[in-house]
Image: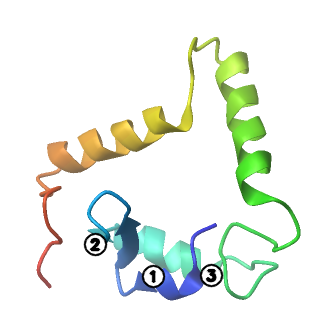
Amino acid sequence: MLAVESLKGNRIRLYQSKTGEHVYVPVPEDVATTLRSVKHKNPACFFWSGHSKVPSVWRKRLADMFTKAKISNGHSHRLRDTFAVSLLEAGVSLDRSPSY
């Protein structure tokens, strides 16, 4: 869904359910600019119209994607893990928010 209000400058505020804290993830300036310029149906969210059941819709779409890509045992956590590895490779600390 990505709430519009979560984009602050070139950072996206995310909630870590394990720690119960919010963290700020840096994004490239062109990504932040593009997000701001994209027209969205729901003024509160970048990627959700507000009319569907988000978890079930995305779960099915991801399942279809993994099937088409012939990835066995595909699940959304694989994407989260890939994102975390990308952050680590870029030198971002995962144990705390970057200071700005």
Placement of the N terminus among the 4 image quadrants: bottom right
SS under mark 1: strand
Residue found farthest to the right: 51
Q: Nearer the viewer, residue 70 or 75?
A: 75
Left or right, residue 62 beside residue 87: right
Give the foreground label among 2 and 3. Answer: 2
Q: CA distance from mark 2 to mark 3?
A: 24 Å
Among the two numbered marks 3 and 1 on one chain, the one whose residue lies closer to the N terminus: 1
SS under mark 3: helix
Query: x, y (%) of residue 22?
Result: 31, 75
CB atoms of marks 2 and 3 within 8 Å: no
Give the foreground label among 2 and 1. Answer: 2
Query: x, y (%) of residue 20?
Result: 32, 69
Q: Give the residue type at disc 3.
A: Ser
Q: What is the number of the mark on residue 23?
A: 2
Among the two numbered marks 2 and 3 on one chain, the one whose residue lies closer to the N terminus: 2
Q: Is residue 81 above or below residue 95?
A: above
Q: Give the residue type at disc 2.
A: Val
Left or right, residue 30 beside residue 75: left
At x 65%, y 18%, the residue is: 69
Mark 1 = which residue? 7
Among the two numbered marks 2 and 1 on one chain, the one whose residue lies closer to the N terminus: 1
Q: Give the residue type at disc 1.
A: Leu
Mark 3 = which residue? 37
SS under mark 2: strand
